[in-house]
């Protein structure tokens, strides 16, 4: 994978997380990639340690992960290209409730805004779920044309539609990735959709390195911020 700014290969053909953050002068130093690789390994070690503990000691973590199949089975058909043409407001509002999505709190606060114009929402989701269209363009269309459609909701919808391909970008994931030093660097003028493409590359690489799926990775962000008792 090429560094999006300096065009150097990073970490042996793997995404180097934030390996390509410019230095204080706005340029890349020769040691930038090497330093970032060390930081990335430290981040992975911290996440692996937390993952191992949660798997063995945290019933809440185990319950959250066990709910994946149920959530995907319930909402993947709802957010399919075929169904969004007749999508109902109650289906969307139901998905936004934590008791139904089992993973994301607070999404329901935007339910009224998102569903205030169902015709616009159906049209935006039809674009979002069209895999023949560039991902960044799809995301930009969705967030720009639907009031209340922020990063947490639009990427959660992408995830349930295709859980092996798209990770979730929300405040928790961004906060933890910043703390770990693996948040990507964005150039000036980078659109929301373009930013997500970079974020998702990092999420996919993390999931591969940790040997977990994106649902489990998304769970891990919560337990990083709110560690289980005894950790």
Image (cartoon, rainbow, N blue to C red):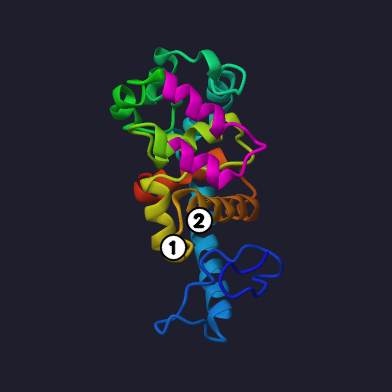
- Left or right: 9 as drawn, with respect to 202: right
Q: Secondary structure at mark 1?
A: helix
Q: Is residue 121 magenta?
A: yes
Of residues 230 and 123, the one nearer the viewer is: 123
The residues tagged by marks 1 and 2 sit, at their Cα atoms, a distance apart of 9 Å
Image quarter hosting the N terminus? bottom right
Question: Mark 2 or mark 1, which is nearer the start of the sequence?
Answer: 2
Q: Position of residue 125 (x, y in %)?
A: 51, 28
- Left or right: 108 as drawn, with respect to 88: left
Q: Main secondary structure of the magenta part?
A: helix
Q: Is residue 53 magenta?
A: no
Image mark for residue 14 = none
Residue linked to disc 1? 180
Q: Position of residue 135 (x, y in %)?
A: 58, 44
The residue drawn where x is 63% and y is 73% is: 7
The residue drawn where x is 38% and y is 39% is: 150
Count of numbered circles on the image? 2
Question: Local crowd at mark 2 within 10 Å, few (<14), some, or many (≥20)?
Answer: some
**Relative height, residue 31 to residue 53 (above, below):** below
Q: Position of residue 79 (x, y in %)?
A: 55, 23
Tell me whether circle 1 and circle 2 mark residues in contact (CB < 8 Å). yes
Q: Which residues are magenta?
A: 119-142
**Relative height, residue 109 to residue 2 (above, below):** above
Image mark for residue 47 = 2
The residue drawn where x is 45% and y is 53% is: 191
Of residues 126 and 112, the one nearer the viewer is: 126
Which corner quadrant of the image does residue 40 belong to?
Answer: bottom right
Q: Position of residue 117 (x, y in %)?
A: 36, 21
């Amino acid at each position: 994978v090429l560094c999006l700014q300096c065009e150097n290969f990073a970490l042996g053909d793997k995404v180097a997380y934030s390996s390509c953050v410019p230095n204080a002068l706005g340029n890349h130093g020769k040691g930038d990639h090497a330093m970032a690789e060390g930081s990335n390994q430290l981040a992975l070690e911290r996440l692996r340690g937390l993952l191992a503990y949660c798997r063995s000691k945290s019933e809440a973590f185990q319950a959250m992960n066990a709910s994946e199949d149920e959530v995907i089975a319930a909402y993947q058909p709802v957010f399919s290209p075929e169904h969004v043409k007749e999508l109902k407001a109650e289906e969307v509002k139901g998905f936004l409730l934590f008791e139904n999505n089992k993973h994301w709190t607070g999404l329901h606060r935007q339910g009224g805004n998102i569903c205030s114009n169902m015709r616009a929402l159906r049209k935006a989701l039809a674009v979002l779920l069209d895999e023949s269209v560039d991902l960044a363009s799809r995301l930009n269309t969705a967030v720009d044309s639907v009031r209340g459609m922020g990063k947490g909701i639009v990427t959660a919808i992408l995830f349930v539609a295709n859980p092996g391909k798209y990770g979730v970008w929300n405040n928790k994931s961004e906060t933890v990735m910043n703390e770990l030093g693996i948040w990507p660097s964005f150039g000036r003028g980078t659109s929301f959709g373009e930013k997500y493409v970079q974020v998702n590359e990092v999420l996919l690489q993390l999931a591969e390195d940790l040997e977990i799926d994106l649902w489990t990775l998304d769970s891990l962000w919560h337990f990083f911020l709110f560690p289980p008792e005894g950790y």
